[in-house]
Amino acid sequence: MRQFNVVVLGAGGVGKSALTGESTSLSHHHCLPSSPVRFVRDVFVENYDPTIEEQYHRPMMVDGELSSLEVLDTAGAEQFTSLNEVYIKSGRGFILVFSLTQEVSLKEVESLRKQIFRIKGSESVPIVVVGTKSDLVSEREVPTTTIESLANRWNLPFYETSAKRNWHINDVFEDLLRQMRLR
Ligand code: GTP
Ligand code: MG
């Protein structure tokens, strides 16, 4: 079975752990056999507990082929962003996360995208961009038109997700896995 390292990057509090991770009540740094919070474990945690670093393992069947994803959920907090270079070197594919309720979090995605291309020395890197918290309709700051124009300009797939409602979470990982298999 092919194994792929995935790194989840984005500003603090945008919902990286809710998208990928483990319930914060469980111990850190352990592996789970199956299901992130949404992608591995299929639950949603309302409390905000900033991440330091957590890694999850998940087998995934896409297009009839079983692969293994090693997903690294990183810290968005400013004091940890010096680690990003190390994370980017270790990753085969990247999930760049911003919150639809926080326009400024898109700037971080823009800067991460540039860092990845610089560190990898190529623009042919598997990347999916994710706008989270689509359920918070009345708090939304990033309109679909902004997303469409960025998707065109960057030529990257964008997904609008809600970890709370479990909307389009699996689409993100499937898209990334297909890209990683091709490159
Ligand atoms: P750091 O680990 O500090 O970088 O933050 P993070 O990006 O991992 O954010 P986290 O997943 O911890 O989520 C932050 C807060 O947003 C938590 O209170 C979550 O419950 C909430 N949240 C995350 N995703 C969603 C979502 O899709 N909808 C709603 N309504 N809230 C969300
Ligand atoms: Mg987190």
Image (tube, grey):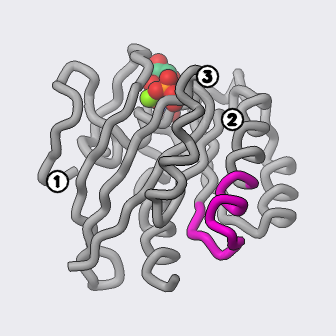
Identify the residue under disc 1: 34
Q: Position of residue 166 (x, y in %)?
A: 41, 43
Determine if residue 41 is in view: yes
Q: Residue at x 72, y 37 (%)?
A: 108
Residue 137, given in percent of the width and then of the height, sits at 67, 29
At x 46% / y 51%, what residue is drawn?
7
Alpha carbon separation for disc pair 1 and 2 = 28 Å
Q: Which mark is residue 100?
A: 2
- 140 or 127: nearer the viewer: 127
Residue type (three-letter) at the residue carrying disc 2 = Leu
Q: Which residue is mark 3?
A: 78
For the N terminus, give its image quadrant: bottom left
Query: Do residues under tags 3 and 1 come within 8 Å of each other at their CB atoms?
Result: no
Q: Is residue 71 left or right of residue 65?
A: right
Q: Residue at x 70, y 62 (%)?
A: 117
Quadrant of the picture in which ligand 2 is shown: top left
Q: Mark 2 vs mark 3: which is more N-terminal?
A: 3
Q: In the rendered structure, which amino acid carries the disc numbered 3?
A: Glu
Query: Magenta segment: does it hold 117?
Result: yes
